[in-house]
Image (tube, coloured by chain):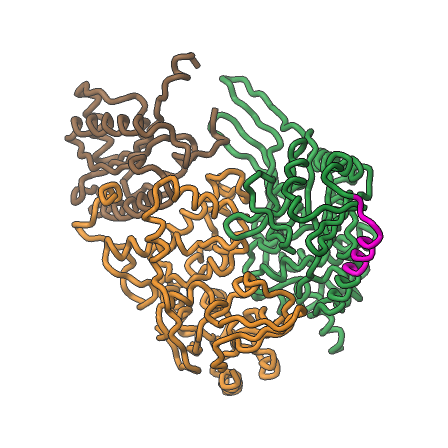
Chain colours: A orange, B green, C brown
Amino acid sequence: MQELINRAKELLADGTVARVLGWKAGDLPYNPEPAYFETEESLKDFVYNGFCGANLSKYMIEASKLEGKTMVCLKPCDTYSFNQLIKEHRVDRDKAYIVGVGCKGKLDIEKIKKQGIKGIQSIQGAEITDDAETLTIQTIYGEKTCAYKDGMLERCHVCKGKEHQIYDEIIGESKDTKDADRFDEVRRIEAMRPEEKFAFFQSELSKCIRCNACRNVCPACSCRKCVFDSNKFDSSQKANVDSFEEKMFHIIRAFHVAGRCTDCGECSRVCPQGIPLHLFNRKFIKDIDELYGEYQAGEDTDSKGPLTNFTFDDAEPSIVTERG
Amino acid sequence: MYKIAKENLSALFQSIAENQELYLPVEVSGQVNYKAWTPDAKVSLETLKTVKSPKDAFFPQSENLYTVQRDGKKLSIQPEALKEQKFVVFGMKACDIQGVKVLDNVFLSDPVDSFYAARREHGTIVAMACHEPEESCFCKVFGIDCAEPAADVATWMVDGELYWKALTDKGEALTKAVESLLTEADGTDAEKLETEKTAIRAIVEKLPYSDLSLEGWNGDALTEKFNSPVWEELYKPCLACGTCTFVCPTCQCYDIKDYDTGHGVKRYRCWDSCMYSDFTMMAHGNNRTSQLQRFRQRFMHKLVYYPANNNGMYSCVGCGRCVEKCPASLNIVKVIKAFEKQGGDK
Amino acid sequence: MSIEAKEEFRPKIVAFCCNWCSYAGADLAGSSRLSYPADVKIIRVPCSCRVNPMFILRAFEKGADGVIMCGCHPGDCHYSTGNYYARRRMTLLFSMLDYIGVENGRTRVEWVSAAEGVKFSTTMNEFVEKIYSLGKNVRLEDIRCRN
C-alpha cells in the first residue's frame, strides 16, 4: 500500500496526473469508499486492502470528463471493464494513468457476518501485503477467526485470472483465487425442471427492492437515461408492484449488457438483498460461448461484440427447444 | 409481566395468526425481511436487522390507491379499500419503532394520510429488545434505548425465554388473546430481565458509533450546512442508487404513478428516492439537477429540515442499515463525522 | 362476455411480422383464402431486427399467451443483415426465458417470405395449437392486466 501511495505522490508532484482515484479509509474496519485524492496531504487517508472491492472503472466514466489525467487503481478484473468502456467510447484512455494493483481476492463483509461474526471492532489479515490465510476479527463479543477464502466475494472464487488487461504500470502481486467454475451454478439451474427453475428465480427475485444499485454500479450500464427511468415510457415503475416487473427489469438489464458484461460481479456484490444477479449474466455468457464461440468482453478494445456480429450459419432460435 | 419458552413461540405465532395477520422477520432465500407468517415460514427472531425496515407494514413499498375501469365509453373509479383487518408486527426493534414515530409526524399530521392512518389504527406492534447490538448501530445517539423498546407490547429474549410485557390497551388486548400460552413471570424473572437490560446497555456503550456527536445539527443550521463545501467531497462516491432510502426506516418520500392495464388505469403510490434523477420531476423539469444536490437533500432532510419542522426530532434513528448496505460505503455517520472534522479544522 | 367464451380458453397470440416478407406473407395467406386462427394479432415492424426483447416481455405482461416473430429468410433481409442480428437476439432471449422457467414453446421465430402464404398459415395454426396445449400464460403475466 505504501508503494502505491508513494507512486501516487510522485505522479501528483510531477504533474503527470491531476488526481488519484483510489479508496479512502472508512470509519469501520470494512467500509473504505472510492475517493479522489488531489493533494499529497489528502493521501494520508488512502487505503487499499481486501475490502476495496469496488470496480473503479465505473468512476472513470465521470473522471474522463474532468480536466487532466486521473491515476486510477484497477484490479485485474476491473481492467476488463475499462477495456470494454474504451470500446464503447465511454472512457478516455488518454485521461487515465492506470496503475494495475495486485489482488489476492476481495472480501465480502456480508459473508463474514453470515458466519455469526458481529460487533466487529477490528480485522487483521485483510491487508494486501498480508500472507495470512485467516482473518482475525476482534469483536465486542470476543475474538473470532474466519478463513480468508470463506470471506471472499463469490466472484473471486471464479476469478478470471490475475493478469491485468490494460495498465501503465503494475504495483503489487496478485494471487490465484479461483477454486470453482463460474458456470457450475448456471448448469445446476439448467438441469432443473421448469417449475423448479421458476420457483428458484421467483424466490430470489421477490426480494428485489428496485433500489437500482445493480444497475448504477455496473460499468456496462452507462446509458445516460435508462429505459427504466424514462418517463416517456411506462416501464419506469420505480417499485415492483407485481412479480412480473422484477423479472422484466432483471432480464432486460442482463440482456442489455449481454456480450458487454465482463462478469465483474459488481451487481451481486452490491445487491442489498443478496440476489445472485450474476446468474443472469453468466447464462448469457455461457450461451454466447456455446453458440457463437468463446468470448470474453474486455479482453481487447477492438473486437466486435457477439450481439453486434453474426455469421450466416448461426443457430436458429428453435435450438432452445431442441436441445431440451 | 409474562413469559413463554422459546420452543413454544411457534404455537404463539399460530395462535396470533388465527385471528389476524402476523408480520415478523422471515428468511427467504438467505435474507431476512418482515413477511406474513405461515406455518412453514422460516422465522428468524435472532436477526438484529432485517434488510428492509418494517415500515412496509404501515407504508408499503407500493400500494394501489384507486382503479379506473373502462367499459365502452363509461369510466368507473373504484377507490382502494382502507385496511380493515387487525394485524400484528412482531419483533420490531426500538430504532424501527422510533422510525414509525417519524412517519407518524408526516402522515398523521394534517392532511392525514388515510391509508397510513388505517394501518396504524389496526396494527399492534410487539417490540423486541436488541439482544446483541452490532457495530453499525447508533440508536443511542438519538436517545433511543434498545434495551427498553416502547410499543404496544415489549418483549425480551433471555436464556431461551421470551419475556412479555403489555404497555398499551392494544397490547393488553393481544395479551388477553394469547394468555393461555403465556405464564406469569415471577421475581427471579424480573431480576434476570434487569441483568439483561444492563448487559445490553453495557454493549451499547462499547459500540464504535455510540459517541457520535450531533452538535450543530438542528433546524437553525440550515444555511451554514447547506452551503458547506464539505458536500463537494462527500457525494463523489455516491452511485445514485436508492439502497439507503429503501432500507431506511424513516424515509417517507413517495411517487404516485399510473399503470396502464390495457383496459383501465391503476393509480398507485410507491417509495421514491431522493437519490434518483427523476425525483420530484415536474413539468418544468427537476429542481435538483446534480447528484451533489440530491445527496445533500437526503442528509439535510434527516438532520436539519425534519428537526426544524418537528421540534428537534431527527428523522434518523441510528438503525445503521445504510451503514451496512451502501454499495459505495457511504452513510449518514460519515456525513456527520465529515462536518465534525471540518469544524475542528477551523 | 358470453358464458361460452369464459369457459373456453382462447389464447392471445402476438405475431411480430416484418414489413417486407412476413407481413406480405400474411397478406398472401389472406388473399389466397388460407385460414389461420383469429387469435393471432399481427404487429407490423419494419424489420425483424426492430423487435426489442422488451417488446416480447411486454406482450406477455399485457396478457399474451404466446409470441411469435416472423421475418425474411436469412439472406433475404430487405436491409441485408437485420434478421441475422435478430436471430442472435431471439436465441439468447428464448434461452433466458427457458432458464427462468417459462414453458418452452411460448415463443417462436419463423422465417416467412412474401411468397409463403401457405407457410404463414400452417405456422400460425401450429403455433396456436401449441399454445392451446400449454394453456394460459401465468408465469410471465402481470396480474394487474387481468380482466
Asked if the stretch drawn in magenta spans residue B58, the answer is no
As drawn, A215 above or below C40? below
- Identify the magenta region: B184-197
Seen at 26% across and 35% down, the residue is C19
Q: Position of residue B343 (x, y in %)?
A: 75, 73
As drawn, B176 above or below A147? above
Nearer to me, A159 or C19: A159
With A133 as the anchor, is C29 left or right in this view? left
As drawn, C44 above or below A238? above
Q: Which quadrant would residue A309 be assigned to in this image?
A: bottom left
Q: Which quadrant would residue B289 be assigned to in this image?
A: bottom right
Q: Position of residue B256 (x, y in %)?
A: 61, 39
Question: Quarter holding the C terminus of chain A?
Answer: top left
Seen at 29% across and 66% down, the residue is A302
Nearer to me, C10 or C26: C10
Q: Secondary structure of the magenta portion, mostly?
A: helix
With A261 as the anchor, is B201 left or right in this view? right
The answer to whether residue A65 is seen in the rendering is no
Asked if the stretch drawn in magenta spans residue B186, the answer is yes
The answer to whether residue A1 is seen in the rendering is yes
Q: Position of residue C110 (x, y in %)?
A: 22, 36
Number of marks in the image? 0
Q: Position of residue B271 (x, y in %)?
A: 61, 45
